[in-house]
Amino acid sequence: MPTMQDALATLIAYWTEQGCLTVQPMNTEVGAGTLNPATFLRVLGPEPWRTVYVEPSVRPDDSRYGENPNRLQTHTQLQVILKPDPGNSQELYLGSLAALGIDVAAHDVRFVEDNWASPALGAWGLGWEVWLDGLEITQFTYFQQAGGLNLETPSVEITYGIERIIMALQGVRHFKQIIYSPGFSAPSEGPGAGSSTAPGISYGEVFGQGEYEMSRYYLDDADIATNRQLLELYAAEAQRLIDAGLPVPAHTYVLKCSHAFNVLDARGVVSTADRAAEFARMRRLAGDVAKLWVAKRDELGHPLGIVQAPAAAVEFEISAAPAGGDLPRTLAFEIGTEELPPAEARSALAQLRRLLTERLAATRLTHGDPRFFATPRRLIAVVPEVAARETDQVRTVKGPKTSAAYAADGSPTKALAGFARSQGVPVESVRTDGVNVFVEKNEIGGAAPEVLALVLAKVVAGLRGAKNMRWNDPQLSFSRPIRWLLALWGPDVVPVAVSALAAGRTTRVLRAAAEPVLTIASAETFMETISINGIVADPEDRRDLIVSGAQELVYGEGRIDLAAEEALIDQITYLVEQPTPLLGTFDEDYLRLPEQVLATVMRKHQRYLPVRSDEGALLPMFVTVANGPVDLDRVRAGNEAVLRARYEDAAFFYRADRKRSPAALRDGLDRLTYTDKLGSMADRAARIAALASALAGIVSLADRATLDRAAALVKFDLGSQLVTEMTSLAGVMARDYALHAGESQAVAQAIFEAELPRHAGDDLPASLPGALLSLADRLDLVAGLAATVGLPTGSSDPFAVRRAALGLLAVHRAHPALSAIGLRSALALAAQPVEVSEQVLDDAAAFLTRRLEQALVEEGQPVDWVRAVLPVADRPSVADRLLYELSTLVGDDTFQNVAAAIQRARRIVPAGTPAGYDAAALTEEAELALHEAVTLVRADLDKSSSDLTHFTAVTSRLVAPITTFFEDVYVMADDPAVRAARLGLLATVRDLGADLLDWPQLQL
Amino acid sequence: MPTMQDALATLIAYWTEQGCLTVQPMNTEVGAGTLNPATFLRVLGPEPWRTVYVEPSVRPDDSRYGENPNRLQTHTQLQVILKPDPGNSQELYLGSLAALGIDVAAHDVRFVEDNWASPALGAWGLGWEVWLDGLEITQFTYFQQAGGLNLETPSVEITYGIERIIMALQGVRHFKQIIYSPGFSAPSEGPGAGSSTAPGISYGEVFGQGEYEMSRYYLDDADIATNRQLLELYAAEAQRLIDAGLPVPAHTYVLKCSHAFNVLDARGVVSTADRAAEFARMRRLAGDVAKLWVAKRDELGHPLGIVQAPAAAVEFEISAAPAGGDLPRTLAFEIGTEELPPAEARSALAQLRRLLTERLAATRLTHGDPRFFATPRRLIAVVPEVAARETDQVRTVKGPKTSAAYAADGSPTKALAGFARSQGVPVESVRTDGVNVFVEKNEIGGAAPEVLALVLAKVVAGLRGAKNMRWNDPQLSFSRPIRWLLALWGPDVVPVAVSALAAGRTTRVLRAAAEPVLTIASAETFMETISINGIVADPEDRRDLIVSGAQELVYGEGRIDLAAEEALIDQITYLVEQPTPLLGTFDEDYLRLPEQVLATVMRKHQRYLPVRSDEGALLPMFVTVANGPVDLDRVRAGNEAVLRARYEDAAFFYRADRKRSPAALRDGLDRLTYTDKLGSMADRAARIAALASALAGIVSLADRATLDRAAALVKFDLGSQLVTEMTSLAGVMARDYALHAGESQAVAQAIFEAELPRHAGDDLPASLPGALLSLADRLDLVAGLAATVGLPTGSSDPFAVRRAALGLLAVHRAHPALSAIGLRSALALAAQPVEVSEQVLDDAAAFLTRRLEQALVEEGQPVDWVRAVLPVADRPSVADRLLYELSTLVGDDTFQNVAAAIQRARRIVPAGTPAGYDAAALTEEAELALHEAVTLVRADLDKSSSDLTHFTAVTSRLVAPITTFFEDVYVMADDPAVRAARLGLLATVRDLGADLLDWPQLQL
């Protein structure tokens, strides 16, 4: 069990052995080792770099006064940069764990997708969290961009979270209990030399007071005005230094900016708008620093040299006589990768299927039905019975027209001679089909290895991920690095060469296997060999193993809700190559935590399957799926400790939160800025309350008491620690805390429902008070942001205005009781601290209309219907009802006739013609009849109703008269007065139901 | 040859083996490892602490764009703290050098006095620079105070200068050439993996660009207004955090203050007053932080425990029969210390001599003549023929008076009974001498070991240094720690016990000796034993070895100027225990540097003896004196490299300076602030020039051209790099650079002389232009500072106003040509940018008068004479002349009579009586005669002259008339008019010469 200082020394020694240069931590506060110039600057440009260093990383926002067992304002990172990517960085990394004394075969070490991005640095990369028995111990990233510059030579960044690793190794439950050093006595000194008598010096003894005091500073005592001034001074100095062409000191000041910003953030005074503006500024400064650095290194002639990309793989000669002989053999093709994200692996499997199928079809190799498999680390195609050679073929090449090929005397023209020459045949071999001349060429089929090599190379080069990355390969790009190719046709290597990769007959199995690299004798034995060595290549097999294994583990204890966990199980299927489900438990005390907290942690954070009783209640256990033949007890213990720590965290927050009343938490919203122009979160909550109350008046809500109380508390849980930590629990915790504080079920539910829907497809508020609050919340957001930062355009929507819009539409639609609420007037009611002009309200209403249109279309409503109901888009629930009515009415002749009549009237009447007419000018019978009918219909129509069925019934009386009218009456009479009256009469018909439907849109 | 990163790892591993805890460097810029809280805070209070860490130390002022081979804006310190002092920290330290592969026996490793103080931290300590073959590689300090608090548990601080050590180990001449790491290839990787092909990665490759750019920032580009604001913001935040009771974040802000200040300093905008004010503020803040920290640790109950002081030594029982027998034996007494500073060792030797002599005399032990010796590590007393026992004695104890002892009847009184009882004798044994009663007690002499033990313990406890320190001993205090006591009387250990120290029979010789600890059989063999083992205990012997050795080494080549180097030789004598002189050389190219530069470096920085030709010119060689039987070639090579580096530094500056004209350097003074209220150094130089010119007018200087040119350049060398580096060369370099630039010898000399005298006893300006400039310089300083910060009071004199005052007095006195210059009016001429009120001028003049008075008295002038000449203190050279005249005149009757007459007149005339009189009111002969004589004398006296001899000659004519006057005339006549006239006449006599002497002061 190493002390923490031993562990740091061991890791540094390990990586210096690997050629890493050690530097010191940055001498200004940084939030991560990435910010140290030894990373941020050195990953830029073409020079090689390898470094290892410790970086105490300061995250003011993580301050917890040293009370939280796992959260520190300064935690210790150990940072490694390998540039260029050495091609085996994962293996090197595992070596470092072994150096720490971790038996990587006994433990469950996994690379779990985690893509990293730092908007403030203009940097991103793809990679993983490394999990040790479920504990995230390392961040592993291939840098793709930094300072806004694409990295032609990607670096591998490995960031160890030292406290976590040590807590796991030492088996302690609070960071303060970490044994940091063995104690002050030299081995040669006896006790009593005045030194501590403890078995060692604990982390708490060394850093505890600092942790408390710095937490105090960041959370409570940092002077806000001072730190704002510092931020500005630092930014200005950074800019000055950029202007002076000095990237190194400029970078230092960018870091100081970043820290000052983080301090302000921890003090809770950074609004969303501030954040966006500061990130933009920092990104710009960091980008300028990066560009300057690159230019300076160019100027200096790259003192550390220039990285040479690996040479392209040589396409070796195909053996004239493949060992496979002339008979069909199996093709086994494996693309070995570093751990693919589950979605990417699935997508890659589909691509492999498509690409290989298409390309094989384009050859003349006969073959059996291919099968395709994928795991996190490999894509496999197995094609049985691939012929040894392509079939030969005769290929016809068309030449000039026959008429142009031969002169009148039948002699070949120059054109023919040229064609023959170009085809390498004598003129005599050219034949004609009457229209054109042509030649026929016999084409001998290629040998399988040769043909397959080209096919497979193109398949590999054609793979694309949703998000692609570069590694040390000079040309390839994919979701994660491709590290090896195995391609065998029977016993023969198919000589695939793609960029720097050449296929061979070796594959790799589990990294911790006794023999991690295997040589495959022939394609026919490939699947069996890897299977024997633990790789379950077929995702369906893995899924079965997971499901059956999990069920077996919980049998008699509880059950796994397979339907509810389907997505999670799909994900797990692509997290392991050899599923090893195991059952863990947790202290049932934690069951006192809200179920959503427990489940969110298990599913989202840990990818554990929750276990439930027959009644559906959570049981204090979980199933996790390890990869490979691990030491079950150790892995179980590790995972249990991780879950315990996470629950301890949550329980810590939960207890602290429940000690405060909802009102007190709500008061804390004062300190959370919403946006700089729109005030605090408390202001926003007050506006939501007022607006909900106003809307309640419109809909004549009966239960005002519930609404009033819920409105007084709405959003209070944003002031709680648990929600600050797990934002997805907003509303859920509000309900819990409100009930705990003695609020009524109805009030608690309404506060919860105010947050619904949280995402597309989420539940909607069931109660009317909840719906009103939810609506008010989203109306306030849209109105305020439309008036200040503007409505979202393009893909950028930092404040999620679109989601709010969709939410409010959904809520309105879900509650017919809300149909009296018009959205534009409701937006106008949402009194903002800034002026909201009519133009803004119009734009916002139009924005909502477009969102409604999209939503309805996406739900499968016919586009013409949707367009037709947009006149009532201001009241989405009305639009819904109209659509519902339409779905019945469109099959109804009456409706069809009414619609046709109205549409016909519209087609005839020129635009702009008013609806009135001088009845006295009407003389013909048909027109008088229509006049009469119209008069009656108008009298019977309820102007305020939006009942389309009623409308159809009433207006059906027009159908006959109007038909007659069109048959008998020539509208465009010579007498202008008559013409005007007739057009006016038709315009009146046209306008019937104009506030219900946009009739011309209806395609009946 | 370790790479730099290896060396750091080795040292950290070594010290962690010694129980040190590793921490990370501070994550804000610090100037030294001492500032890291792991030192600054942890050395406070009673808790134990041991740590080792690397600290990149940022010294903006050391920025050199990476061009200087030895100077960096960020250098790497390795810091070790041992608390409590383990008692063997020097030995542990030597072990660390051995761990680095340094053969400490072959090299000359020395601990050379260096007392450390950080005014800004309120911290100080005593200790050493550690020299490796003349190179300072480590700072070694016993902390005594930090944050203004006395450290009850002193810590040992060991600070390695890593770049210097590595440059020495790797034998490179520029820090950029240091091999920092072995290169980017892991051992298992072949070449061509894109890594550098260099044998290793150099320091320059890793840090070169940063060194250049940060230098640019600190020297040229740091925004001054920004850094001023930062300084204020940081200080305010520190204060706020102190008020909030949070020492840890407050400390961080104190460090940020310190760095911002250093940046401003490097930008050359910190005035002397700013510096004083900032240091005061930082000292106050640091003090508050320290107090808070101590209070918090008390509150927390000292989590790391409390250091237990070593137990007091037990006084063991004296053997009843000492092995030494009954015959007299030698006493050998040795007090072993860590390296004492030379002056302290000499003083301690004197104390030992006095204390032991006195205390031995107070015993009844007969003994021979003691001898005393001292080296840096030991004080020795050897006393031959110390008797085995004290002689017995009869002691008389006096009791009450006999009359009170016996009643009238002769019976004993109660008083007598009480006395007898108190003496433990029967009443019958009491006798009387007539006056008192007494008893006689026989006292048996003590055994030598017993008696000596008490004597020696008191001697040890009585030692005091000029500056004393504490170490791990609970009671002792001395210049440096006392580590062992050897005390033998013949073969017997004298059982001395002082605090935790107990004497024994072991001694220590050279630390690198094969057997560093020896056991001594008997006192008689002690001196011989240590001598055989290399210790030359007698300073005279060491001095002889040094002188003769040095002379032998240079024989035939040159000579050592023994007279001139006497003080240095005295110092060297106490730097070594076994002098090993060796001759080193340096490149004769360096002889182009000014001799003062070469000699200052050799003497002051390196303690080398310069070698001169018979003509007195420096030769390119030096003698250094190593300690013990070192490897001469290695030590020579090391010392030569050190000197080369120092000369290279100086040459670097010298070349750079000479490239700029004096005028250009002078222009640079614009950027040096003198004080905030008194402008820049350029302003000050201009004022000096103007004042010198005005003074020249007063003294009618003939050679105005020389003065004008010198005045135009005066102080220009303060803008040079060499003087910035070695301030003691101010003036010297000015002369050199001026001559180089083609100025005349006279001008160059005058500029040089402007700086004289630089300290008490220094040369004074020889030329009149030089004297005028020197005077103007000092008058300007006194006037300006008196008007702004005020004249010095108490011991604080940060601007050295007293030294300036003494200097200007000395210059005035040295140049009778300046006698026309009155100091007060000259001060008034020194036009300052601030108002200098009459009051300030009066005060300043009075201040100068007091300094003159002191100086004259200290020179041995009779106090009454000095007081008598103070009326001309405004013109010190006149005062000098008057004193000279007095020395002749006081033996002269005429003068005595004149003085007596004037004094008599003063005694009679009431104070305030004006000197005029109505001659018509005089009637008596005697008074008329006096009137006549006075009238004649006044006519003959030259009012403007200050020639006392002339005055005496003229006024001698008054002696007879005044004598007659006093005999014949009753001054206090009844007639007021007569009385007034008589008093007026006497007052006129009284005032004769009042502007020459303060006659009443003269005691003749």
Image: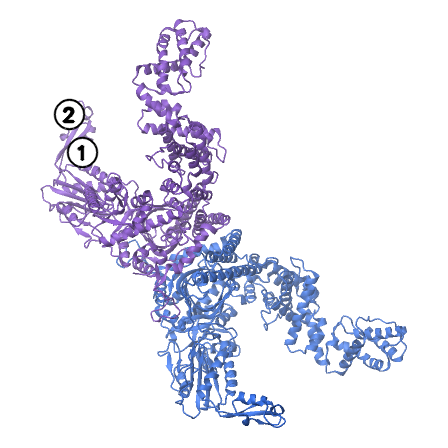
Chain colours: A blue, B purple
Q: Kindly identify the amino acid type of the residue bearing the numbered disc 2.
A: Asp
Of residues B553 and A369, the one nearer the viewer is: B553
Using residue A965 as the reference point, say whether residue A118 is left or right of it: left
The chain letter for the residue carrying disc 2 is B
| Rendering coords of residue B376 (x, y %) | 24, 45
Q: Is residue A31 visible?
A: yes
Of residues B463 and A173, the one nearer the viewer is: B463
Residue wearing tag 1: B423
Q: Is residue A167 above or below residue B533?
A: below
Q: Are marks 1 and 2 in contact (CB under 8 Å)?
A: no
| Rendering coords of residue A825 (x, y %) | 70, 64
Nearer mark to the viewer, of 1 and 2:
2
The chain letter for the residue carrying disc 1 is B
Of residues A692 and A569, the one nearer the viewer is: A569
Using residue B433 as the reference point, say whether residue B988 is left or right of it: right
Using residue B532 as the reference point, say whether residue B934 is left or right of it: right
| Mark 2 element type | loop
Q: Quadrant of the N terminus of chain A?
A: bottom left
Measured in 3D between alpha carbons, the distance from the residue under mark 1 to the one under mark 2, in whole angstroms, is 17 Å
Q: Kindly identify the amino acid type of the residue bearing the numbered disc 1.
A: Gln
Residue furthest out toward the top: B924
Callouts 1 and 2 on one subunit: yes
| Mark 1 element type | helix
Q: Quadrant of residue A206?
A: bottom left
Badge 1: how crowded within 10 Å, few (<14), some, or many (20+)? some
- Residue shown at the point (41%, 6%) measured from the top left: B928
Residue wearing tag 2: B433
Q: Is residue B328 above or below residue A429?
A: above
Q: Quadrant of residue A914?
A: bottom right
